[in-house]
Image (tube, rainbow, N blue to C red):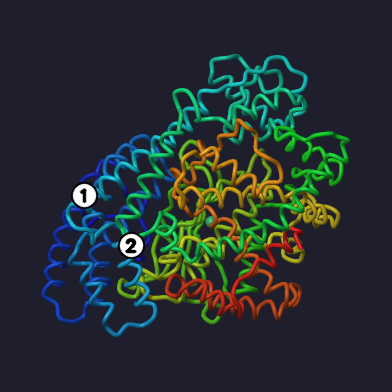
Amino acid sequence: MNLNTISNNNLPLFSKINVIEIENNVNLSIDKLEKDFKELENKMENASKDYYKLCVYELEKINYPLHYYWGVISHLTGVKNNEELRKVFDKVQPDIIKSGNTIAQSKILFECFENAKKQKLNGIQKRIVEHNLLSMTLSGVNLDKDKKKIYLDTQLKLGDLETKFKNNVLDAIKDYKMIIKKDENMKQLPINALELYSENALKNKMKSTPNDGPWVVSLDSPSLIPFLTYYPDSKKRKKLYKESIKKASYGDYNNTELIYEILDLQQKNAELLGYKNYVEVSLVEKIGTEKKINKLLNNISKKAKKKGKEDIQEIKDHFKLKKLDYWDIPYYIEKLRKEKLDFDEENFREYLVFENVLNGLFELSNKLFDITIKEVNVISENIDIWNNDVKFFRVYDNSDLNNEIASFYLDPYVRPEEKKGGAWMDECVGRNKILKHKPVAYLVLNGTPPLNSKPSLMTIREMETLFHEFGHGLQHMLTNVIEGEASGINGIEWDAVELPSQFMENWCYHKKTLMSFAKHYQTGKLLPEELYNKLIEQKTFQVANGINRQIYFSMLDLYVYSNKIDDIYKAEKKIAGKYLVKNIDKEDRFLCSFEHIFSGGYSAGYYSYTWAEIMSLDAFSAFEEVGLDNDEKVKEMGMKFRNTILAKGGGTNPLKVFKEFRGRDTNSDAYMKNYGLL
Ligand code: ZN
């Protein structure tokens, strides 16, 4: 089959993709895959050797055309969306999932993996086989007919409940509006918040301007957070806060009963698979264990609670307050920040020119990992791109500057009309010996574009995001693993994936690195020392209660998925009492909008955020220990990082890889130090 979308160097021909042909192409590919898979099953049944080759390599080969094509289409829905494309995507996606399930439920394939396990395999291959056996087991392949039916029905029901949960949160948010007319207090809010509230008003058919209102404030974070942070009247903050903590817990969009149902169904399916509870199911595919997570987080909690209490006391003392309610905390933190640090992000921005930051990042990569990155002229080299702002780069090992080891696309600027929000790294092509592929990555950002004859000036968060996604990209591109299923980020446990990405973020705050590219866009002058110091200071300013909150969420998640819960609100109160420095409001119904664990794929896995941060800071501290300004030592450590964490992908257990890099198991010392908790 010729899908007519791949050029001879394995790069997608985006401009050749015709929306009208997608459905037909996918259907043809699925038919072909199903036919090929039947034949492969036949071969597997009759095989007496070469099991690994059959269940891994042969399967990879027949999966590849659809996998690649669908990867390109999915990418386009993220960066060049339109209604036509979305319609086709939604229409054919269920068929793709169905065809994937057919393979995941194949008893013959499962047995072939079991036979492969008995073959002589290297460590990477062993892990690939074990991963497949585990994920097929978790999809119910071994259950008898009746139980399998119950299991799959329950999974379907869970899918529905998750969608309902998410929609209830969305609808509850949509349902509430605080309308503000003529109000001098609004002058205290930043202009981008006023623009947002005014836009909300226009959407509600009111005549509005950002400066004179009326304004509509809603319960979603981009709207809620600036209001709680800057609006000076406590009564109005209280009203909005109270609405926000009970959203989706009453009226038409009540998630309470859904939570009981979800917990109940997850428990039932866990038992069907032979596990005690859903936490066990979730953790079996991760590197975290209940014991380790509890130990690590409780350890941090002890110190963070102490610091959190001090932080609250500092605010009370400074502003001579008798009490400090939840709806007043963000407001006073911001006020204190202004008085103590006088940090204005806008001043900083003029030093973060996108092109300079990018070149600084490439120079850093050269220094740390011995690689050179060169931009490719997409026109003269005939590289198809989906938007004119997209850049294409080749990555070379410094030992050979003629043959690239990998390449990547970079789509830097925001395009709300067709691009999804947020930022991500995705695989375009993965390293694979069977298919003879070198890695190609997509790096997609939503940065500030060049405006009014100014170059693109980045916010601090945008700079961090570039480093973050590039860190994911490095792991994808610098992999040494040649088995497709374990190369790059493939096969890495969920709670270890964010290690290289968060690791790279730390370099944004390293003085020498930052000063190598932070030059004023007009004068070319280097970032003033004073601004740099403020940047470092504000990083740890009043952060302890944010940490306490993350630990509370992590523990609440594990608690509800491992205990029989008769009253979710009691559970919430109990865990909050243990991990927060201040009792939650009696009207707090946070679980009803905790999408991460009831509809976002983080169920019994929310701890991963803190866990990955601990590992990444621990890795970075290895560089601090040898001296961040000692170029020779830093390079040595960088190469060690490249040869372990970036190179070994999903082929080795991440805890083992970490130990190889660090010479010991991971611990939270660096995390504590970073947040001033020692
Ligand atoms: Zn990430």
> Residue 53 placed where, x, y %?
24, 76
Locate residue 287, reporting x and y percent.
Answer: 48, 66
Q: Look at the numbered disc 2 and give the secondary structure of its residue.
A: helix
Tag shown at residue 135:
2
Q: Is residue 344 above or below residue 524?
A: above
Query: In the orientation shown, which residue stands out farthest toward the bottom?
Result: 120
Say which amino acid is labelled 2.
Answer: Ser
x, y (%) of residue 473? 51, 63
Q: Residue at x 53, y 73 (%)?
A: 645
Element assignment for label 1: helix
Front one among 5 and 554: 554
Dot 2 or dot 1, earlier in sequence:
2
Residue drawn at 86 percent across, 41 percent down: 339
Residue 674 placement, left or right of 552: right
Dots 2, 1 in contact, CB < 8 A: no
Label 2 or label 1, whichever lies nearer to me, is 1
- Residue of label 1: 149
**Quadrant assignment for the C terminus:** bottom right
Query: Does 496 appear above or below 537?
Result: below
Answer yes or no: is residue 287 visible.
yes
